[in-house]
Image (cartoon, rainbow, N blue to C red):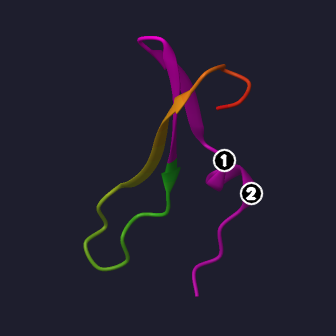
Amino acid sequence: MIKISKEELMKGRVYPRGKTYTYVFDLPPDALTGERNQKNKRGFKTEASA
C-alpha cells in the first residue's frame, strides 16, 4: 500500500470558468505507468463552494 501525506492529497486549485467555478487536484501517480492522475469537478456557483 502506498502511504500518502495529507499535504500531497490536497494539492490543487480552484479557478473560474465562465459563470461557474471548477476545482482540480492531483492524485497519486498510476502505480504501473507512473502517469499523472487528476480529479476535477465543475459547475460550482461560488469559489467557496468549490
Secondary structure beneath disc 2? helix
Secondary structure beneath disc 1? loop
Q: Residue at x 65, y 67 (%)?
A: 4
The answer to whether 33 is drawn above or below residue 6 in the figure is below
**Left of 2 or right of it: where is 33?**
left
Q: Residue at x 63, y 55 (%)?
A: 9
Q: Whole-percent x and y of residue 29?
A: 41, 64
Q: Whole-percent x and y of residue 45?
A: 61, 21
Q: Whole-percent x and y of residue 49?
A: 71, 30
Q: Whole-percent x and y of residue 11?
A: 60, 42
In the picture, the quarter occupied by the C terminus is top right
Would you say residue 29 sits in the magenta stretch? Answer: no
**Residue type beneath disc 2:** Lys
Is the residue marked by circle 1 packed among few (<14), some (14-19), or many (20+) residues within 10 Å? few
Task: State the residue position of label 2.
Answer: 6
Would you say residue 7 sits in the magenta stretch? Answer: yes
Q: Which mark is on residue 22?
A: none
Write down the region rendered in magenta. 1-25
Q: Quadrant of residue 17?
A: top left
C-alpha span from label 2 to label 1 = 6 Å
User: Farthest bottom residue?
Assistant: 1
**Nearest the eye: 48 or 1:** 48
Q: Residue at x 74, y 24 (%)?
A: 48
Mark 2 touching mark 1, by CB under 8 A?
A: yes
**Nearest the eye: 27 or 19:** 19
Q: Which mark is on residue 10?
A: 1
